[in-house]
Every structure is written in C-alpha cells, then in structure tokens.
Image (cartoon, helix red, strand yellow):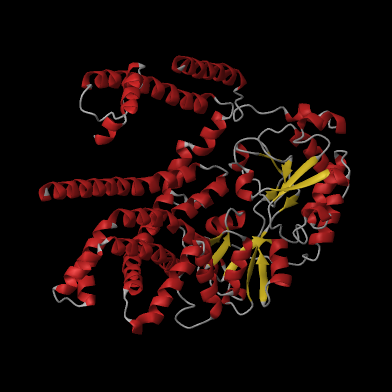
Amino acid sequence: MRKTLVLVTLAVIGLGLTTAGSAASPALTAKAPLAATASSCSYAAIQPELFKRRVLTVATDSPAYEPWFYNNTPSNDKGYESAVAYAVAEQLGFTKAQVKWTVEPFDASFAPGPKRFDFDINEISYTAERATVVSFSVSYYAVQQALIAMKNSPIVKHHTPADLRTYVYGDQIGSTSLAFINTELRPTHQPSVFNTLNDAKSALQDGRIQALVADTPTAQYISSSEIPHSVLVGQFPSTGEHYGLLFAKNDPLVGCVNKAIKTLTANGSLAKFQKEYLGIYTSVPTIKP
Amino acid sequence: MPARESHGGAYLDEHRLLAAGAPPPSSFAGNGRGSHLLGGQRAAAISTVSTVVFLGGVITLFVFAPGAAAVRHTFFNPQQMKEAFLGDPSQGLYSVGKGLILNIEMFLIAEVLILSCALVIAVLRQLRNPVLFPFRMLAVVYTDVFRGVPLIIVIYGIGFGAPALYIRGISTQSDFVYGIAALVLSYSAYVAEVYRAGINSVHQSQVAAARSLGLSQWKSLRFVVLPQAVRTVIPPLLNDFISLQKDTALVSTLGAVIEANRAAQIDSSTLFVYSSYTVAALLFLCLTIPLARFTDRLIARDVTRRLAGSGAIR
C-alpha cells in the first residue's frame, strides 16, 4: 500500500514535470505580435480571447471615484471612464447589456496569474516599469496633477517651488500623485500615505495634512463638491503621464482595443466625453513644481 | 496491573496484534528494544524518501509551473528586492529596512506599556474588596470590549477620531502616538487575560499559607501569588509579543507612519511587483523566529525544572 502510494506520487510529479515543461510559456520574455491580432478585430474573431465569451468583462476598483464614475455604479454609463468603457465595447461590437462590470482592487490588478477581466479601467497611469508586468492600452486620458488645500492654508498664496517643499502632503497609496510628490515636489517632511483617497480627504479636512495631490478632474471634484472650504490651488505642467486600460501581459485583445481607442479619439468621442464629464474643469491655473 | 490480569482477553489481543506486525501499544515499553530499533531504521528510511518526494514535488511545481517565471519576476526579483530594502527616493520608492525601525520602536514602546497596564487590570479583577467593585466592573467591561473589537477598527477610531475632536493636547498628537495608544488598548485586554490565567493557576493553598503567616491580602498577592503567576505565563506573554510585532503594521493605515509593510505596499504599487512584500516578510521573520525559539527554550527549561523539583520531593 505504502509502495504504491510512493509510486503514484512519483508518477504524478513526473507527469507534472513533462506537461509543465511543454506548457511553460515564457510570458515575460516573448512579445505578442499586436499588429497581427489587430488585423481582425471583428466581434466573432475576438471571442476566443475574451474572459467569458459574448461578454466584455470590465473591472474597476470600489469605491469608484467621481467624475470618473458616478454613485459608485460603473454600469450606469455615467462618468468619463464608464463612458469610455461602453464606447470601446460598442466599437468591438458589444451591446450595452453585454458589458459586465467586476470589482478589482487596484493592488490585485497587477498580480501574476490569470486575470478575471478583459480590461481594467481605474485611473491607472502607464509607466515603463509597470508595463513589464501588465500590458496597457494607448492613452485614453492625458493626466496632469493638481494641488488641493483648505482655503485658509498658506499654500494657497505661497507656492513657489521652494515654498512647495515645506508643506506636509498626503496621498492615496499606489497613486502616481504620491510618486509626483516625492519625485517632483520633494518635500522635506515625509508625506502621509493612506489606504484610500477618502482617508486622505478626511486627513486634509482635519488638518493632519496641508495639501493633497490628485489628477486635475479628481482635484476639481474634491474641491468643488466634496470638501467644504477646500480649494484647487492649481495644476502642475504635464509630465507626459497618461491613463491606459490595464490588460494581462501580452493579452491579444490589446491591439483591438487600441484600434477602438484610436477611432474614438479621431471621431471626437473622447473629446466629447471629456467636455461632458470633465469639461467644467477648463481654466485651472498652472503652478511650477 | 490488576486490570490486565482481570481482562485476559485484552492481553491476548495485544500479542496477536504484535505478531501481525502492528507497533506495540506503548512504544515506550521497556522490552522489545531490538525490534523498536529496527523499526526506527525503517522509519528513518521511509521519512527520508517521503521528505525527498515532498520537497522535490514542491520545488518541481515552483520551478516548472507554467507561471513560474512570472511568479519569480513578481515575488523574488533580486534587483527589486534590493531596491525595496534600501529605497530609492528619485523613483518614489520607500525603504522597507528603514520602515522596520519604526515597527521595532512601536512594538518595544507598546510592549512595555501593555505589560504594565494589563497587570493592573488583571490585579483589579482579582481584588475582592467591595469598595473596588466599580473598578472590577470597569476591568471586565474593558477586556470584553477591546478583545472583541478588531484592532484595525480601534486604530481607525483613535487615529481618525481623536484629531476630528479638536481637543487641545489630544487632537494634535502624531499618528505614531495614536497607533501605539490603539495597540496598547487592544493588547492590554488580551494580556490581562493571560495574567489572570496565571494568577488562577496558583493554588489556593498558597494564598491560605501566605495569609496564615500574617501577610495582608495585598502582600500575599504581591509576594506569593504574582511571582509564581508571571513565571508560569511567560511563554504565552511572549506569544502575544510576537503577535504584537506583526500587528504594528496596521498602524500604517493612519498615513504618517511609513513602517515596513507600508513601504513595501508603496513600492509594490509603484512598480507593480510584490518583491517588496517578500523583503518585508523576511525582515519580520528575522524578528519573530529568534523570539519563537527563545520561547521554546524557556518552556523546555521550565519543564525540566519542574520535573527536577518533583524528583527531589520523592
């Protein structure tokens, strides 16, 4: 009995070795031929590449923040990112009802292993390092960082590059805004880092931090609708940062989605969404980091 | 012995089992040492083979799984592990090693406060003076509440609640202070129960003896009960201390305390890899494993001491 058990175990391991050896796909070394997959992006052709056939599974974090989404309900087709997701789906030949939303925490979105979505739309900025682990679509929004403070804070009037180093900042973990504080503003006091943007907002209200950095639309929304007596001090010049849809590394779908985003840029749809959802944010003063 | 004589059937059964190759009912039985040794050799061979097969299987899975390359890149990237340990401000990366210093500071300060607060609470619960009834009540309610509420909620409650109150002196403390306050509140409740168990483990006769020698209730507690009680509960106290070391990571939710785990989290979400978490885990193990071994040694020493004691009495 014991002998057979050992033999069976050995056989199973041997089998595992051979199959694993042949199935081992060097996921991180090979680049998928994007152009080749993009040649046929018909609804029928992309079915095998989907997480679930005949359904476009789109992920975002919860809570989903305004003005990117409204009422934490991505499926209401309101808010910039919700609108972009539905427009991309339409380009790929899906109806509105075929778009299924799923919650993917930001921290889990880049974990190795199979993804539980076709793409993730969650204000995720493209960086070269991140792109070694996941694939990004082309830009669907060019990002600029902006500064939010309480009205009575000295930062509202004094924000020369030298002044900016002296304040106490705070931000959400994982945001490129936090990286912006550390690499561009380089404050002398270590910035606070919160689990969620909401925690950072409450810290700003209670005076535990003096300023918060967020992308301009988020910053506008926070200062105009969320925190009473807060103000958008200004936005920083672009660093070339942009938001991209997040895919599993080398997902064959990227090529087709890129094609869809390019179409939406060319036909003015993205500009229209920006005007509709982000449009109140037109004249924002620029400050230098 | 009398049991065996009166149940001859059971005795025979034992022999039948032995003949069938089953291990003797009590492997510590004196005779039959030869066959025991033989079994030992066979057991050693089997355990060697099974260890090799098990470890081989695990390593095989880890090295040859289809996603192994991705997992190695994400969790065990030496370059990124080094970066995470040292930090790189130009890239917005924090140092996990530097963060660990904060963890160590927090748990050392907290542990000292916890050990003293908890002892006071445990003693309060033990005192039988009717005047002290409200304090006894308070101690019971306190341990019930703070053992029941998740630590993370206590941390949030104090760290976000206290500043919102705008009370001079309380609302302007640093997150470091709020965090330690929350750890002390929560852990004192647990540790008080550990002390209480230790106090209850001291036999009533000890108290009776102390009182009959003319010691007051307080003095018999202080000089007779507590020294024995504390010595008994040192291993569980160290166990709670290990747990506290890890829970200091939760304080980072308040924002300003960038300890090892938070530094690792920031590095992870900046670069989209988890190697920084591996660094944090290894650093925490470097702290907790020596303490765990030390606890084992204390327990072993206590056991031998007690056995030696009973031998001397005999």
Residue found 34% across the figure and 65% down from its top:
B196
Q: Is residue B120 above or below residue A184?
A: below
Q: Is residue B14 visible?
A: yes
Q: Position of residue A13 (x, y in %)?
A: 52, 19
Front-most of B303 and A171? B303
Front-most of B134 and A221? B134
Answer with left or right where residue B236 lies relative to residue B74. left
Q: Position of residue A162 (x, y in %)?
A: 52, 67
Q: Is residue A188 visible?
A: no
Front-most of A280 and A254? A254
Q: Is residue A188 above or below residue B52?
A: below
Q: Position of residue A195 (x, y in %)?
A: 57, 58
Answer with left or right where residue B185 lies relative to residue B112. right
The quadrant of the image that shows the C terminus of chain A is bottom right
Report how many numbered discs are placed on residues in the image. Answer: 0
Residue found 80% across the figure and 34% down from its top:
A53
